[in-house]
Image (cartoon, helix red, strand yellow):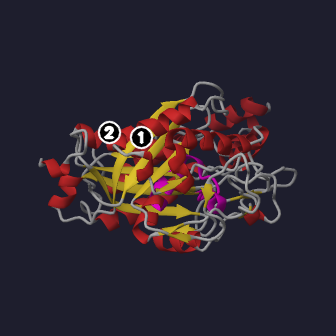
Amino acid sequence: MSDANLDHKGRPVIVVTGVGVVTSLGAGRQDNWAALTAGKSGIHQITRFPTEGLRTTIGGTVDFLKDVPISAPLLTERFAVLAVEEAVAQAKIGSAGNFPGPLFMAVPPVEVDWPQRFELYEAGKAGGGTGYARLFAGARSGDYRRYHELSTFGWPAERIAEKFGTRGGPVSLSTACASGASAIQLGLEALRRGDCAAALCVGSDGSVHAEAVIRFSLLSALSTSNNPPEAAAKPFSADRDGFVVAEGAGALVLETLDHARARGAEILAVLRGCGERADDFHRTRSKPDGSSIIGAIERAMDDAGLAPDEIDYVNAHGTGTPENDKMEYLGLSTVLGDALTSIPVSSNKSMIGHSLTAAGAVEAVFSILTMRTGRIPPTINYNVPDPAIPLDVVPNVARDASVATVMSNSFGFGGQNLCLVLAAEPA
């Protein structure tokens, strides 16, 4: 391998050669990017399940696909298939059903969905009893192995691995809101170690169901600004009141620069660095001193070999919760210092909502599109700036700018904090 294919630490340069995305705005790069840069919101009233009596009745659900069963694992798989098909087609890598590398896939926690619970409960009626006893009686009354498969954590990744023919055992992971970025991190590390020359990194989440909304609501994490739905997500605003739950998928094909150049692939971006730091303070809150977020950003900058004034744009985690936005500003201002005042910042979640497990991968895709188009998506609903968060937020309308480097942040509830640094061209 020539020195031109090594980074500042003597490791293989890792590039992105294909991306795919599905959000509440649409399926595919073209539709998503047109809507995102136009400031269009994909947040709307939830119709998938009854919301009467719930404090939050809105979400960024993907409702435009036909013939999709209402099941979190099946939706997670369907979104992933669409995103991976687009990414692999753009990368022009391998052949149908034969991807030349491993799969790293972020998936949501799993459980038996309500439609299956109702069926099992009805099937157990003859056995008498109530509650779990009746559910177990129903499960014993017939062959429900399919339900067992659907409630197995690794099932969606197994299906994607079978369809696209990835190498080795697929890796399933879940690190809360950082999961999609964690999948990219694992791919980056495998490529740097020399385990493979290409990797498929995916974050997918189809778990917007009644229980999810209720659970997040009990944590006081969700916005209750239901009317109008498109105005609910207000990252970095003084009147922000929580995030909007959403779903979707993002997929990236990663390769070593040497491998990509050898096969004549188009290089979309360079994955310059990644920083990770765990937060052990609270199941949802960040450490008050911000040390975990600060550590993740510092490590990403060191890994990328960049100085603060070399970051052109921050694609913020920007959930719109009072706590998270404040802590993200603390982390950015501590590490980037005075340079932060001239770095534009925006949050995709203002338009697509928080796609949870998928968010880090989806936002990495949008970060790459920002560099390739020279257009920074806006943070919509930014009408009442928070004076305690003096960021250069791109407000309400997209901004044209030359963007050569992007920092993309993903911070998980009480767990992983991840920062990715991407660049437009190989160094």
Q: Quadrant of residue 392?
A: bottom right
Nearest the eye: 226 or 139:
226
Mark sitting on residue 300: 1
Q: Residue 130 in the image: x percent, y percent?
A: 80, 32
Numbered label attached to residue 189 = 2
Residue sitting at x 44%, y 46%: 308
The residue nearer to you, when weighing 310 against 371, is 310
Instruction: Out of 308 and 95, give the one closest to the viewer.
Output: 308
- Label 1: which secondary element: helix
Residue at the far front: name it: 338
Q: Is residue 112 above or below residue 344?
A: above
Q: Residue at x 80, y 66 (%)?
A: 228
Mark 1 vs 2, N-terminal side: 2
The boundaries of the magenta stretch are 346-366
Extreme residue toward the left, this view: 2
**Residue 48 spot, x, y in % from top left:** 71, 60
Q: Amino acid at mark 1?
A: Ala
Residue shown at 42% from the left, 64% from the top: 371
Say which residue appears at 42% left-offset and 36% top-offset. Answer: 299
Chief secondary structure of the magenta portion: helix
